[in-house]
Amino acid sequence: MNLDDTVVRTTCPYCGVGCGLLVSPDGKGGYKVRGDKDHPANHGRLCSKGSALGETLSLDDRLLTPVLDGEACDWDTALAAAAGKFSSIIEQHGPDAVAFYVSGQLLTEDYYVANKLMKGFIGSANIDTNSRLCMSSSVAGHKRAFGSDTVPGCYEDLEQCDLLVLTGSNTAWCHPVLYQRIVNAKKDRPDLKVVVIDPRRTPTCDIADLHLPLQPGTDTILFGGLLTWLYQHGYGDTGFVEKHTENLRATLDAAAWYAPSLTAVAELCGIDEGNLRDFYRWFAQTDKTITVYSQGVNQSSSGTDKVNAIINCHLLTGRIGKPGMGPFSVTGQPNAMGGREVGALSNQLAAHMDFAEDDVDRIGRFWGSDNMANAPGKKAVEMFEAIESGDIKALWVIATNPAVSMPDAGRVRSALEKCEFLVVSDCMQDTDTMRYADLRLPALAWGEKSGTVTNSERCISRQLPFLDAPGESKADWWILSEFARHMGYQGFEYTDPLDIFSEHAALSAFENDGNRDFDLGGLHGLNKLQYDGLAPVHWPVTSAGESPLAGKQRMFTDGRFFTPSGKARFVTVNPRPPGRLGDPEYPLILNTGRIRDQWHTMTRTGKSPRLNGHIYEPFAELHPLDSQRLSITEGQLVTVESHLGEILVRARISESQRPGSIFVPMHWNDCFASNAAVDKVVNAYTDPVSGQPEFKHTPVRATAWEGAWYGFVLSRQPIDATTLPYWVSARRKSLYHYELAGHQAASDWSDFTREMLKLSDDEHDWIEFFDSANQAYRGARFIGGRLESCVFISGDYSLPPRDWLMGLFDAEEITRQQRLRLLSGIPGDDSEDQGAIVCSCFSVGRNTLCDAVKNKGLVTPEQIGEVLQAGTNCGSCVPELRQLIADTLASAEHA
């Protein structure tokens, strides 16, 4: 299929906002990506990551053929080997000796086949998804309260509310397009109040009327206190509670025990009592209130209780099922919701059914299977423990990287090493997980896939291909279906994703009669044209009514829930301490999460030079009080160590961090850095209900790392720095950028550099400078007058700025004066040094922005946008622009 002459309407492969895209040829052999103005999720907006998707389509690091035991092979050989090994293990040890570990990066059709194969025909529920790591506590909380995994509201509610509570969600960076919808709503209605609840002062606080920097792990106390306070002050909706809920009394009694008063809650949560009182009053007096929560709530050993503590407050006030009201879980991955729909979590079955006897029988009859799994399988952490112990002997990993993303990643890597047979389906030829694989299978990537995804508001969108399948790459549903055929199973004779989607829709409606929330009966039987042209639609989509494709934006509008009684349940929760408490040896609390311009383990975003401009190096952010106590300075390398292991990253000092806490991003791994995979130090404690790991609370210590030398390399060609104790690599413009450090200085820096850059002995166009007194070495290579590479080394970690040097690589010829400046490490004037990138969408640097503030009188982000465009696309840099303006004006005032 050649789609080069068309505009393709598809969806973004990043977060759970589910933005619509328009992709078309750029006339230069690549593709331009624009936001789809007709898509209800984004109305044409894109974040920095979505805008840069066209930069991530190269095939240079793609896996393009099956590889068995290190040798390329054809598909039949690969799948026959996999089927033979799985069959042998199942025959000897039973179906629970094999497992699938899948991903929210899959399309729903891929997910459906994987789940059907494992639970319906292999006969084990040992299939779990990396969504276990990000939203399974929300699933469990929904089911306890509503009797079903139902997101009650839609994105429009965030714009229609009068009070928006953002808790455990750095929306500005993690869901930027949704954040911009909130920003615009607040501009249109200045009375809209925003409360941010987060231990850190994140960029999301830029629009906050109130920030509550609670003590990590005290969310349950805060919302339990809110429940108590609302009830004590008569703010409950008595009619709604009596008619539509149950179990209030026991829930109130528990909350009154651990959160008896506002004063006690403020003390336990470490929040100013006056600020907490304001929040409680605003919540009490504002009918249209939405509470948005994400990983800061979910990723906890008590995440499910935190979710229910939030839902309890909305049930007490009757704020659910109405415009501008309700609890709202925002998911992390593009199709985490689709995985929930098909039952990809190990404790669920397809179409939002469970392991109740009736559900097992119903799905078995629908699939024509007499080998249905009839009990939950291993959740993610349990699964890898079982692999390490040898109970699970064969594992198939699909579209995810557990060697990096799982907690206690060192133990996970040990499990992968011990696994008798490991299959990895991925589009990338080299990931941390792929390095352990016995069988590597080349899968399609975004841009090549066809199917559907469901975003955080239950909106199903089509993902359409605009690229041909490269090499021998295949769709995941095809790989799994062919594997099923090799295993001898019937029922996988799919020829197109439409076949799968139609079956998925039919199952959702099978013997449903309105008893289950998930119902796509109105989408069953679509033809190819209707499927390819499917407009975004919220489920449920039933077959009843004049417009069967008109889905339902809000649930529970009639006050009926999916519990046996039809009433929502108040859930009694009790605060629990985190899985591992701190001690004097590990006095800091580690919090992990995302940064603005990177995604998961960087296999896609790491290819984009634009996205590497803002933050190109892993870091640990500490409060100034902690850095002073620990004698750690800005820019210094530090080890962050728990009882499990340690990582080595760059120190950042910021008052945005809460004292006693430390933040490290989750993205870096062994493909991009020497030792920065933060989950190697993260505890594997899990929520007892959801099985979700605790990524936000690991006791650690931070120690300054003293190297003998520090340096960086900018080169048009890659180098091998993997023998050094510290290295980080990033793609920048047309260059490879490396940050380096070592324990021992070289006896001859010239020889060291030449070997590192693989320069020949007769290299003529090479200049270098060495200052022995300051242990400073600089070298640069030219080819035909153009700068080819440069190296800067020092005995100190304070090195010249990198960004202006990158500008020299753009010149066709470097002048003599520029060569001298290069060796001195000092730019000639401001025009040569735009500074570190602030706006990734338009590549606008800090120095350029500061100059515009000082010399052009630009004093608002809007004015900067008019002149420099910065902040006018996704807007996620606007908080940084506002801070930069304030800092620049303050410096000018004191100059």
Image (cartoon, rainbow, N blue to C red):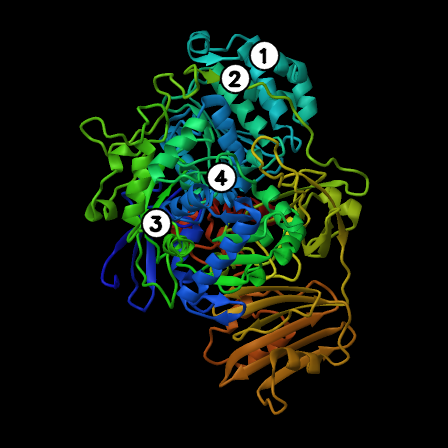
State the separation of the CA atoms marked 3 and 4.
21 Å
Distance of label 4 from label 1 (alpha carbons): 30 Å
Q: Secondary structure at mark 4?
A: loop
Q: Which residue carries the number 4 mark?
A: 345
**Most extreme residue toward the right, as rendered?**
584
Return the residue nearer the eye: 341 or 96: 96
Label 2 belongs to which residue? 570
The image quarter containing residue 167 is top right
Pointer 2 local density, CA inside 10 Å: few below 14, some 14–19, many at least 20: many
Position of 672 relative to 544 (above/below): below
Residue 852 % position (x, y)? 48, 54
CA distance separating discs 3 and 1? 49 Å
Residue 250 marker: 1
Residue under the point 45% across and 79% down:
812
Question: Of helix, strand and loop, which one carries label 1?
Answer: helix
* Dots 4, 2 in contact, CB < 8 A: no
Q: Mark 2 or mark 4, which is nearer the start of the sequence?
A: 4
Q: Hey, what amino acid is under mark 4?
A: Leu
Give the residue pinned by disc 3.
Answer: 492
Left/right of residue 591 with respect to residue 613 in the rendered view: right
At label 1, which amino acid type do we have? Ala
Q: Of label 2 and label 1, which has the lower sequence position? A: 1
Mark pair 2, 1: CA separation: 9 Å
Among numbered discs 2 and 3, the one appearing first in the sequence? 3
- What is the spatial separation of the Cα atoms under label 2 and label 3, in whole angstroms? 42 Å
Q: Secondary structure at mark 3?
A: loop
Query: Dots 2 and 1: beta carbons under 8 Å?
Result: yes
What is the total number of numbered labels drawn onto the structure image? Answer: 4
